[in-house]
Amino acid sequence: MSEVTNKVISVSYNLHKDTAEGEMIESTEGKEPLAFLSGVGQMIPDFEANVVNLNVGDTFSFGIKSENAYGKRSEDAIIELDKAMFLDEGKLAEGIEEGKIVPLQDQDGRVVPAKVLEIGEEKLKMDVNHPLADQDLHFTGNVVEIRDATKEELDHGHVHGPGGHEH
């Protein structure tokens, strides 16, 4: 964990598979920068460690191996859920189809992306591995803003306002 805590750090970034030249996974280009609260474990630790000591205007380019990013795929993350949970007036809810990613909630109320693998008579087989499990990542970008977190942000443990993660 970094020594820099209670700062709101905003970054513009591109995320690529494997290397800076790899396939683009996501980007903030044309969108608000990503803002996060440092020192609270909100980000992948290696991501935070690589940007937390930079200054506004600094650029970055670094890779993170899958085991330090979203981890390894696990067969334990292939689960079966009752089909009844996904029914809307007796029919499968809109968007529930094989191959689609749907949001589920875990027991702590966090949203977990799940891929529909199979729709059976009684059960749905879902893959709740993170979509980027087993994937090496490469981030490039720059630091847009650094500011002290507000008391409210510290109390809530996340950033409020533009680019902030709302939970």
Image (tube, rainbow, N blue to C red):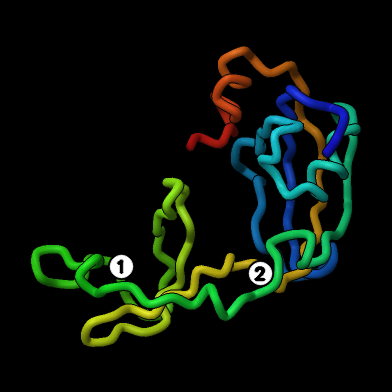
Q: How crowded is mark 2: few (under 14 residues within 10 Å), some or many (20 or more)?
A: some
Q: Which residue is under mark 1?
A: 95
Residue 89 as seen in the image, left or right of residue 149: left
Residue 99 as seen in the image, left or right of residue 89: right
Q: How crowded is mark 1: few (under 14 residues within 10 Å), some or many (20 or more)?
A: few
Instruction: Tell me if residue 120 comes above or below residue 96 in the rendering.
Output: below
Q: In which quarter of the image is the N terminus?
A: top right
Mark 2, secondary structure of its residue: loop
Q: Which residue is drawn at 58% across and 65% down?
A: 130
Q: Where is residue 55 in the image (x, y as percent from the top left)?
A: 89, 28
| Front label number (1 vs 2) | 2
Query: Could you say which is closer to the camera, residue 2 or residue 101?
Result: 2
Query: Could you say which is closer to the camera, residue 107 or residue 30?
Result: 107
Q: Locate residue 58: give its quadrant.
A: top right
Residue furthest left as drawn: 89
Q: Residue at x 45, y 67 (%)?
A: 114
Q: Which residue is drawn at 74% across and 22% down?
A: 6
Instruction: Tell me if residue 164 comes above or below residue 86 in the rendering.
Output: above
Q: Where is residue 10 in the image (x, y as percent from the top left)?
A: 72, 32
Q: Position of residue 92 (x, y in %)?
A: 20, 72
Q: Residue at x 23, y 82 (%)?
A: 122
Going by the numbered disc 1, the residue's amino acid type is: Gly
Q: Which residue is under mark 2?
A: 133
Going by the numbered disc 2, the residue's amino acid type is: Ala
Q: Locate residue 150: give its quadrant.
A: top right
Picture mark count? 2
Q: Locate residue 81: give its quadrant.
A: bottom left
